Image (cartoon, rainbow, N blue to C red):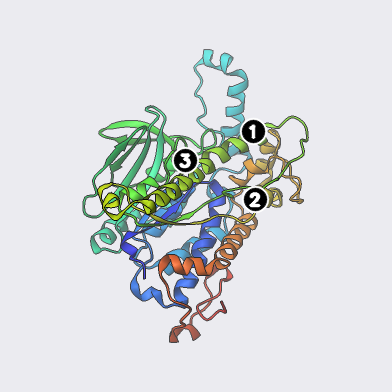
Amino acid sequence: MSDPATTALLLGGGGARAAYQVGVLQAIARLRREVAADALGGPFALICGTSAGAINAAALACHADDFDGAVDRLVAVWQDFRAAQVYRADAPGLMRSGAQWLTMLAFGWALSRFRLAQPRSLLDNSPLRELLAQMVPLERLPALLAGGQLRALAITASGYGSGDHVTFYQAAGGAAPWVRSMRQALPARLSHEHLLASSAIPFVFPAVELDRDGRREWFGDGSMRQIAPIAPAIHLGAQRVLVIGAGRMNEPPGRRVDSAGYPSLAQIGGHALSGIFLDALMLDIERLERINRTLALLPDDQRRATPLRPVQALVIAPSRRLDDLAAEHIDALPRPVRVMLGGVGVRSRRSRHDPRGSALASYLLFESRHTRALIALGRADTLARREEVRAFFGWPQRRVSPACSTRTPTAGGSAGPCAGS
């Protein structure tokens, strides 16, 4: 059985795509119940998150004493999501944010002469503050850290002033901060402001001002300039890391996309966001694998002399392109949002073969029809790899507890511990 104290969970960014993470966690909770591992406490003592993954990570960490209940709460939120819970999706709200922002881009030279207030983002995410207040009870963290149910929660954000990538963490035992090139880790009393900063997708959501070493700095999405996503977990003592991605790590060989004319702003924007959210994680995983292979070649005495240590990683990522999945659900967005996105090239198509602009839409599609499909995909992808999951955690083969006959299915329709494997 793997030691939860040295097992980390890493949740990356991706806006609405983070619903996939919830499906993966739901499947892990099911597999854990099948072997009655719940009697040993939660499977993760180190939890790290970035962007929307930071919100999921914090929600889990705040209920580290009840992993199954924490997952059920996440499922309950994500399976019935509405875009209006994250950002103003009504016409007046969009007029105050998106329309003003686009107007500023077109006529900023003229508006600046009148010293008019400049809009800060394309969308107004003030509703997200209310959701975080209900979803993430950060006041529970100190007791969980003191009680040993959790060792650390780490949230990453990117400083617009310094250009640094900063990991804010709250940990038991006074974990020492660290500094590397263009990145730093600082102990902090984590707040909802840290979550809002970490999930502030550039241009889309507004930056958030945070305290950093006694001074104030504006921060945005933690996926920006994140060159080593796995590093915080390793610095905090992880020997095993479960990484849940929000996009495919690799495209099938030989895949080609026919050109349909000059790319729209939506296609370009979606491509840029994919680079922000996906590329660094994929490269860091490859780096970790190379280090593990190199260490395995060293004699024991040389391996003990190096500060490097092998870290076991299990990566669970979507088995299909989430752009294609989003293309099937674009028309689920509120009409004012569809109209606004249509202006930059997002088109509503039910066919997965016409994903024009769907990459951009996939990050904003906080609608239940889309999030339920993502949850189902995450659950199915994980259950298809159940033997790898069991091996990662050191869980034995399925062993049903006597209580299984009375447990009801979890939220979202997932099977309980008596379900067939």
Residue found at the very far left of the displayed protein: 173
Amino acid of disc 1: Ile
Q: Residue at x 68, y 42 (%)?
A: 338
Cα distance, mark 1 to mark 3? 18 Å
SS for tag 1? helix
Q: Which mark is nearer the camera, 1 or 2?
A: 2
Q: Residue 28, how many percent across, how many down?
A: 48, 67
User: Which residue type does callout 3 highlight?
Assistant: Ser
Residue 12 picture location, percent across and down: 48, 48
Which is more toward the observer, 103 or 114?
A: 103
Q: Which numbered disc flags the more N-terminal residue, 3 or 2?
A: 3
Q: Which element type, helix, strand or loop, lies under badge 3? A: loop
Q: Is residue 273 above or below residue 401?
A: above
Between 246 and 348, the one lying in front of the other is 246
State yes or no: discs 1 and 2 in contact (Cβ < 8 Å).
no
- Residue 192 seen in this snapshot: no
Dot 1 surroundings within 10 Å: few (below 14), some, or many (20 or more)? Answer: some
Residue to which mark 3 is pinned: 223
Classify residue 85 as left or right of residue 150.
right
In three-dimensional space, the C-alpha distance between marks 3 and 2, rounded to whole angstroms, equals: 20 Å
Q: Earlier in the sequence, mark 1 or mark 2?
A: 1
Residue denoted by label 1: 268
Q: Quadrant of the N terminus?
A: bottom left
Which sits earlier in the primary sequence, circle 1 or circle 3?
A: 3
Please state which of residues 416 and 389 is positioned toward the viewer in this rendering. 389
Q: Position of residue 255 (x, y in %)?
A: 70, 45
Secondary structure, mark 2, is loop
Task: Work out whether residue 172 can be spotted.
Answer: yes
Q: Nearer the viewer, residue 123 or 154?
A: 154
Q: Which residue is mark 2?
A: 321
